[in-house]
Image: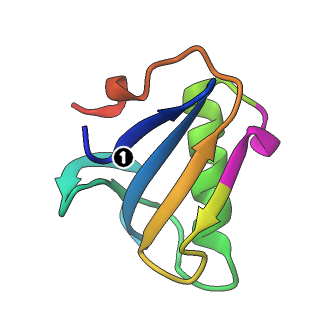
Amino acid sequence: MSWLRQDGSDWVLSLYLQPGARKTEVAGLHDGALKLRLNAPPVEGKANKALIAWLADWFGVPKQGVVLESGELSRHKRVRVVGTGRDPAGLLP
């Protein structure tokens, strides 16, 4: 899968975000990335915080285990998830 790669015991995800959505959910694939709708506005880092919290909950890791590697101010983001046994392929509907 082009949006997903394993790096040792970590997972690295390529994401495309749609902030300001009615609810946070996976919306499929978009241009080689996993598309997520976020129920958070794209202001003052709120969407990034919501993304990290949602991914930490889904993967069952602490928030410190979700690292935003690139795309802090972009809809396109690369996120590293550390220390999970859960396969991110399960994110796809």
- Horizontal side of 71 relative to 35 (left or right) equals right
24 lies left or right of 3: right
Q: Does the magenta portion include 32?
A: no
Residue 57: % across, % down:
63, 33
Give residue 50's quadrant in the image: bottom right
Q: How is the image coloured?
A: rainbow
Judge from the rendering whether residue 60 lies leftward or rightward of residue 93; answer left or right. right
Residue farthest top in this picture: 85
In the rendered image, the residue lying farthest to the front is 8
Residue 33 in which image quadrant: bottom left
Q: Residues within 10 Å of mark 1 (few under 14, many from 20)?
A: some
Q: Which sits in the foreground, 57 or 84?
A: 84
Residue 60 seen anywhere in this rendered image of the structure: yes
Identify the residue at horizontal 20%, vertical 51% (top origin).
29
Q: Is residue 14 above or below residue 18?
A: above
The residue positioned 69% from the left and 84% from the top of the image is 44
Q: Quadrant of the C terminus?
A: top left
Q: In the image, is residue 12 above or below residue 46?
A: above
- Tell me, yes or no, if residue 23 can be seen here: no
User: Magenta residues?
Assistant: 62-67
Depicted 58 relative to depicted 31: above or below:
above
- Residue 4 locus on image (x, y percent): 37, 40
Q: Quadrant of the N terminus?
A: top left
Query: Is 68 above or below relative to 4?
Result: below
The residue type indicated by label 1 comes to Glu
Label 1, on which residue?
25
Callout 1: helix, strand or loop?
A: strand
Q: Is residue 69 left or right of residue 32?
A: right
